[in-house]
């Protein structure tokens, strides 16, 4: 019997401008997302992922310490706890990307993974942190320190890779070696060079590693930063690297696809990339 998993991605535009408080942003984005989360649950979605720092704006075009106020504990913060309730209500695994405060002054770009019974399984912290024009992330986030965990959920082995991480194939391979069947990449990316890479890199990771990828992006413009337009276009790619379903470029949307996990074995038996790896020759990759 085929292992077909109904998976979902939610892309949503920011509701308020940068003058609103962190509390107002969190409430507005939760209010915007909950109807989509409810819809996913009622459709029978088994694994759902939200976008990068889903409960706020993408504030990294600034270097304003105001946004430290958006950070919260994981898993004991209010957003993760609320999502645990929805996961349990709908028997749905949820990937929950938030701004994490480990302790005052120590912050991470994090995604919590919640199992279908509402129990928190663990978290991934974004490992690769950009510091380029419009994306001053090192002001807000420490590099992740939890490696590349894969979470055994009720339905599949789930990995997470966040936004800028996708430019680095090493972590994508590590997730495959750690057993990932589906890797979710919550993102906040605007038109420009990354637009062409958006539909290139992550399908390539899917093909090189023989797993599914769910890529999630925001939509619309966010003021006052106006660094460009978040172009949505969230999608699923299969283990052959083919985009099998894609969302619109401009609209809030829940994208749902049935993913046949049996395709992973079929593809890996055809393309023996894991068998033919030569890790003993790769030591230069780990030298500074």
Image (spheres, rainbow, N blue to C red):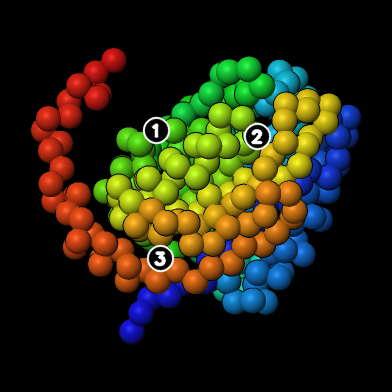
Residue visible at 30% across and 50% down? Answer: 209
**Label drawn at residue 190:** 2
What's the mark number on residue 34? Answer: none
- Residue bearing the label numbered 3: 156
Q: Which residue is mark 1?
A: 168
Which mark is nearer the camera, 3 or 1?
1
Report the front residue among 150 and 242.
Answer: 242
Of the 4 image quadrants, the one containing the N terminus is bottom left
Q: Nearer the viewer, mark 3 or mark 2?
A: 2
Q: Horizontal and vertical percent for residue 117?
A: 54, 70
Of callouts 2 and 1, the N-terminal one: 1
235 left or right, relative to 191 = left
The quadrant holding residue 72 is top right
Count neighbours of disc 1 (C-alpha within 10 A) and say few if under 14, some if 14 to 19, many if 20 or more: some
**In the current view of this chain or complex, which residue is farthest to the front?**
196
Which residue appears at 58% of the width and 41% of the height? 187
Cα distance in 3D space between marks 3 and 2: 30 Å
Give me the residue at 20% from left, 55% from top: 271
- The reply to whether residue 64 is visible in this rendering is yes
Q: Residue drawn 24% across and 25% down? A: 285
- Describe the element under mark 3 as helix, strand or loop: loop
């Amino acid at each position: 019997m085929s292992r077909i998993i109904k998976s979902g991605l939610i892309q949503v535009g920011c509701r308020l401008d940068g003058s609103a408080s962190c509390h107002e942003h969190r409430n507005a984005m939760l209010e915007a997302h909950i109807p989509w989360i409810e819809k996913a649950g009622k459709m029978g979605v088994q694994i759902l992922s939200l976008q990068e720092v889903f409960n706020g704006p993408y504030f990294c075009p600034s270097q304003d310490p105001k946004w430290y106020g958006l950070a919260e504990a994981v898993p004991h913060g209010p957003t993760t706890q609320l999502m645990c309730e929805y996961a349990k209500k709908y028997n749905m695994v949820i990937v929950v990307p938030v701004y994490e405060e480990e302790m005052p002054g120590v912050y991470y770009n994090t995604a919590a993974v919640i199992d279908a019974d509402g129990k928190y399984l663990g978290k991934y912290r974004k490992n690769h942190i950009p510091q380029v024009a419009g994306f001053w992330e090192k002001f807000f986030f420490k590099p992740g320190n939890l490696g590349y965990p894969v979470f055994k959920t009720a339905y599949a082995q789930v990995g997470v890779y966040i936004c800028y991480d996708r430019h680095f194939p090493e972590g994508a391979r590590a997730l495959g070696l750690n057993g990932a069947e589906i890797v979710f990449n919550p993102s906040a990316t605007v038109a420009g060079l990354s637009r062409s890479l958006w539909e290139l890199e992550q399908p390539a990771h899917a093909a090189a590693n023989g797993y599914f990828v769910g890529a999630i992006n925001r939509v619309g413009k966010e003021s006052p930063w106006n660094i460009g337009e978040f172009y949505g276009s969230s999608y699923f790619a299969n283990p052959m690297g083919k985009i099998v379903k894609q969302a619109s470029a401009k609209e809030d949307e829940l994208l749902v696809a049935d993913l046949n996990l049996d395709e992973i074995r079929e593809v890996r038996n055809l393309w023996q990339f894991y068998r033919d790896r030569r890790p003993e020759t790769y030591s230069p990759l780990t030298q500074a």
